[in-house]
Amino acid sequence: MNNEMRNGWIDIISKMYKDLHNSERVLHVSKESDKKRERLLNYFNRLEKIHKRVSESKNKSDEKLLKGFYYDLYVIKPEDIPESYFQNQVKLARERGYGNIELTNEDKKRMTDQVIEDQKHSLDKWIEYFLYDEESKSYEMWEKYWVFQGLQNLGKYDKKTYKFSKRDKTTVYPFPPVEREFIFTTLHLMEDYIKDKKGDEEIKSALGSGNFKMLYEYVIKQSMLKDKLQSNTTSGKWVKYEQGSDYNILRDSLQGYYTGWCTAAGENFAKSQLAGGDFYVYYSLDNNGEAKVPRIAIRMDGKNKIGEIRGIADKQNMEPEMMTILEEKIKEFPDRDKYFKKEHDMKLLTLIDKKVNNNIELTLDELKFLYEVDSKIEGFGYEKDPRINEIKNKRNIKKDCALIFDVKEEEVALSQEEWEENQNKFKIFVSDLYLYGLTSADGLVLPQSVGGNLFLDNLTSAEGLVLPQSVGGNLFLDNLTSAEGLVLPQSVGGDLYLSKLTSADGLVLPQSVGGNLYLSKLTGADGLILPQSVGGNLFLDNLTSAKGLVLPQSVGDNLFLDNLTSAEGLVLPQYIGGNLNLCSLTSADGLVLPQSVGDNLYLSKLTGADGLVLPQSVGGNLYLSKLTGADGLVLPQSVGGELYLGCLTSAVGIVLPQYIGGNLNLGSLTSAEGLVLPQNVGGNLDLWYLTSAEGLILPYDFDLNKLICPSYIKNEILQNPDKYFRKPPSEEENISVHHKR
């Protein structure tokens, strides 16, 4: 670099950092008599020597010291993390339907540690780039200084405005990714300006003042606009990142695209997300025809449950042109409808909350949604979203319900006392109706609609009972022993309790039950017509025969068929979100299982696998505890929890899942002959009765502390790791999940 260019750079830096030449660190390596340029040159030469020593020696201790120096200067301090950050986490949890959570001091410390770690990791990338990258070695130290100092002004990038937020000591967001092309272009813009004082009108003032942030934003903007013009295709491919796989591969594939996804930000985010489940990304083609541009992300909770879906439009919404691709993909997931309902409900509830707080009128559809007329509002938390009642408390409930149900305001009752004064007057009852003491329905006039729970716990006969057309909450008919004369509502939003009903004769159930359906005493299914869908658990615990049984198409949670001893005539739902309990089945004859079971599958008494076709995936544990032989056994591709094969005496013919999230119990095997273990076992591997290590091949990254076997076998493995551990996947095998920028 010639003297003119060097002096131009020094002048730019001294203009930006007016007091730098008088700072203690500069004067430490200069004389007071030195001129401004000389002082700064001495300082940069000193920096160059320090960094060169670390980069050439590659001494980890020196590198650690240097990084520690920069951490002290630039990484956020615990006391500087604003309270608004924690409040925002609470707000986000609330908007996702997790309720009004309270953060403990431990929660705040954990969040603080994560913020700091993510900033350190992201700053490390810049430090390592300037220390070791061959490209950066062509840059002078004052150029590196200018870039690195400019970096301290970059917060979170907004794709809509093409600008970074201003970083200060309270900024919690990690540092942006290292983008070599953008750094190179920004430096050359500056060099060209220093050479002849020319530049684009849009950035002339930024060039003159040496404003790195504005120039860097300009370079990114031009690149993104160019990409939009040249590459607007939706063509591409999906890539699946397996639960527990290398999170760096996923994170690296997202760098530089400014998706806004937290997966791309801090390493801890990507790590925790892949630890919690599989991760799918759709990459569209870039200008070179390579599938590298991330457009859709699907994060799973385990193997089968969708955690969240994100796009790259404003606020991580889906681009309209990508919806067809997404809709086609999620057909693979059993809980797709459930997820979309939760996502829809939380977004609509957030919108309604904002409208109410800003005194904006709600539409009729919004009112119906708020009062859960057609279906319950579903969120991602374990309890009902507190915003529902908070919003209602701000409104004229009688007026709202009169509009919804097309009745007069005076026909709407808000309390039981009000309703009891004149039962014939009210068509709509908003809240819970407690009629515990009633043993007979004589003279009872119920409203057309009950918004909350309806308690008729002690009613022993349905004679004379006219139930509402709809019950928004739970319907308690716990003591009914006969369905004779019983006409149930068209819909029950919550649970339906018919726990003592011993016969289904004359029973016509609602078309849908939003919560649990309790039919625990039924011993036969003759005449039983179940709802098309049950949102919660379906209890048929005492059913001993499936004859005449037509189950719902979907059960949102658990299906209990604990006493079923034969699968003859059994047609299971297409989708079961929770556990499937068939723990009394001794034979698989006639058994057709769903393609997916969201949680545990209990087949604990099955002694043979003849005719058994298991689901492709089981989200929780798979209990085959009594199975003694593997002939004809085709196991799922993945088991999210534990796999119990504790009575299996031979591994010959068995094909284990590729992935097991929990323990693998093969405690009765005496030989590893024919045993092909999964690529990943998340928990313990029980081979306690193994008499020899011969034939055993463990997953390449398996922790031997998790192997339960005789000590002499473990010693044999330790002495011969190459013999007993699978080789790591080759680069060729990983190419499908490894994208380089």
Image (cartoon, grey):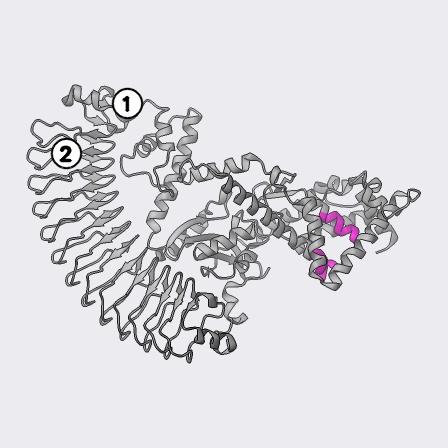
Relative placement, left or right, of 284 versus 306 is right
Q: Nearer the viewer, residue 94 or 696?
A: 696
The quadrant of the rendering that contains the N terminus is: bottom right
Residue at the image point whose x is 41% and y is 79% from the top? 695
Determine whether the residue tagged by mark 2 lies in a helix, strand or loop. Answer: loop
State the image coordinates of residue 345 (x, y, percent, origin top left): 36, 40
For disc 2, the marked residue is 467
Q: Nearer the viewer, residue 44 or 487?
A: 44
- Residue 179 visible somewhere in the drawing: no
Q: Is residue 284 magenta?
A: no
Q: Nearer the viewer, residue 532 or 502?
A: 502
State the image coordinates of residue 451 (x, y, percent, origin top left): 25, 31
Q: Is residue 703 above or below residue 574?
A: below
- Residue 82 visible somewhere in the drawing: yes
Highlighted range, magenta: 129-148
The quadrant of the rendering that contains the C terminus is: bottom right
Residue at the image point whose x is 15% and y is 63% from the top? 568
State the image coordinates of residue 440 (x, y, percent, origin top left): 8, 32
Disc 1 residue type (three-letter): Lys
Q: Is residue 687 above or below residue 299?
A: below
Q: Is residue 562 above or below residue 734?
A: above
Relative placement, left or right, of 366 versus 310 is left
Q: How many marks?
A: 2
Q: Which mark is residue 398?
A: 1
